[in-house]
Image: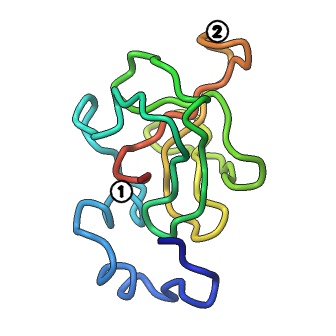
Amino acid sequence: MSLDDTELPRTEDEWRVRLTPEEFRVLREAGTERPWTGEYVNTKTPGVYHCRACGLELFASDTKFDSHCGWPSFDDAIPGRVKEIEDRSLGMVRTEIRCARCDSHLGHVFRGEGFTPKDTRHCVNSLSIR
């Protein structure tokens, strides 16, 4: 299910009706699910991961890798589908990633860790993708 721009909820109350309380907390309030609890942490199924809120294709499964951090990790996003925003919460500077279509929180991106040749880890909440 992929929503087009005219079908996207316009208010947080409309999002609250479409999403479960836990999905709303993560996607719309930039929450984080507990590590090692998400349904996609250990998944190896081929395909494409979509934004759970609007259905936009975000990550190809061949970019997913085991980072052993407790959340699904991808070394690349589909171009133009994920936007990056500086996040100064928790007393540090990180880069938050959001869906480019509906602005839902996905997780954070980290660079320079050396996990893959692309040297990038998109650390994504399972509740943010499908």
- The type of residue carrying mark 1 is Val
- The type of residue carrying mark 2 is Gly
- The residue located at (38%, 87%) in the rendering is 14
Residue 72 spot, x, y in % from top left: 43, 32
Q: Residues within 10 Å of mark 2 (few under 14, many from 20)?
A: few
The kind of secondary structure element at disc 1 is: helix
Residue at the outermost right position = 79
Mark sitting earlier along the chain (1/2): 1
Q: Disc 1 to disc 2, how far (Cα)? A: 27 Å
Quadrant of the image occupied by residue 98: bottom right
Name above or below for residue 125 compared with residue 45.
Answer: below
Front one among 104 and 87: 104
Instruction: Answer with left or right where residue 45 lies relative to residue 92.
Output: left
Residue 114 spot, x, y in % from top left: 64, 9
- The residue located at (59%, 63%) in the rendering is 56
Quadrant of the image occupied by residue 57: bottom right
Residue at the outermost front position = 46
Quadrant of the image occupied by residue 113: top right
Q: Residues within 10 Å of mark 1 (few under 14, many from 20)?
A: many
Residue 94 spot, x, y in % from top left: 58, 36
Instruction: Answer with left or right where residue 20 lies relative to residue 94.
Output: left
Mark 2 = which residue? 114
Mark 1 = which residue? 26
- The residue located at (31%, 79%) in the rendering is 16
- The residue located at (53%, 83%) in the rendering is 8
